Image: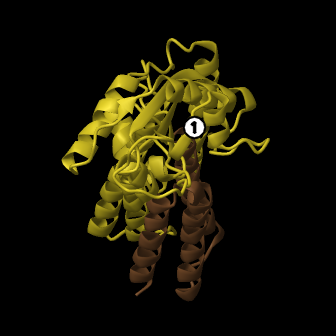
Chain colours: A yellow, B brown
Amino acid sequence: MTNILAHLFTPQASNNYKAKTLHLSSLSVFMLIIMTSQLLFTFLGQKLPGVLGINSTVTAEELVDLTNQERQSQGLNLLTINSDLNLAAQQKAADMIAHNYWAHTSPAGQTPWAFLKNVHYRYLYAGENLARDFFDSNAVVTAWMNSPTHKDNILSSRYRETGIAVVQDMFQGQETTLVVQLFGTQAGNVLPEKTNEISQSAEAVLAEMKSTPLISSFHLTKSISVSLTIILLSVIIIDSLIITKKKIVRLSGKGLAHLIFLGILLVLLLGIQPGLVL
Amino acid sequence: MAYLILIVWLGALSLIFFKLPDYRLFTSIAIGLSYFLWGIITHLRNKTLFLPVVLEYLTIGLLATTVLIFISLRA
């Protein structure tokens, strides 16, 4: 057993003075493992959604509360829930799923405002934020607040009402939680600022929202990738130390360069978070 | 100097990777390709460029690109 480990992780005669883990054949096996696992996750996600599924915890109520907390912290009026806006948000989410698009304007050219008109919501101001595949409500609102255009919507003094739809469905080939948040002020409402302009919609926040997966394919992929990178980094360090200590000369790439490169890869893997904001 | 260039360049690409999520696939390819080219140029200058070395940089660059692409697709 010790011999096998030494063969895998330390340079010696049996592996031509280069840890077997760093041989091209081993690196190719690592790549194969990554690719195979991804195919497996995709397959399991489709066939066994209960295993690699999404168990969303995002709720409209939490999103309204968090939105109002942000507004309250800025001394703004609190938004009230409007059933017409809720309905429009539901229709927008259903339209995105039905026509498989992730944008403010549908492929057919239907703008967010068309959904407001469909429910006869006459607005002075209106806006829309979108998000997808977030794990919880906090992550959604945080992503929005980190995006200037979405933040503008959340903290706009022009809005009096909001409507939110949280829909979990198969979207673009995977189980996804879509969030549509609409903002509005109805014509006739007294506003803090009197202008007749109709606001342009903020760009949608298409971020992943609240899904607490039984097993999240993102976190599983991240764990495998981070583990693999740490193993390679460790072996390179051990290998380089032994090579330097024993003054072994061999034909190989630069160990320090590999360390820098894989170190940066590790930082990228640890730093990446799910969710997109558009 | 060669290492400094590597760190600065990969650092810049890393910033793009985080700041521009829409371009992560392209950035992932750029990161792997950059490392491969850096290895080739560096060993060429040192007159230590041989096929096993080329394959080593190619494999590590490909592995990193593969990992980054998959994690980006899942994010």
Which residue is painted at 68% across and 29% down in the image? A95
SS at circle 1: loop
Image location (x, y in percent) of residue B54: 62, 68
Q: Is residue A226 visible?
A: yes
Note whether A77 is above or below A97 in the view shown: below
Image location (x, y in percent) of residue B36: 58, 68
Q: Chain of mark 1?
A: A
Note whether A203 is above or below B31 in the view shown: above
Residue at the spot of label 1:
A122
Image location (x, y in percent) of residue B43: 55, 80
Q: Please name whichever residue, A27 or B19, is drawn nearer the observer in this view of the structure.
A: B19
- Mark 1 burial class by Cα count in 10 Å: few <14, some 14-19, many 20+: some
Where, by quadrant of the figure, is residue B41 drawn? bottom right
Q: How many numbered tags mark residues here?
A: 1
Which residue is painted at 46% across and 30% down in the image? A163
Which residue is painted at 54% across and 69% down in the image? B35
Q: Is residue A59 visible?
A: no
The three-letter amino acid code for the residue at tag 1 is Arg
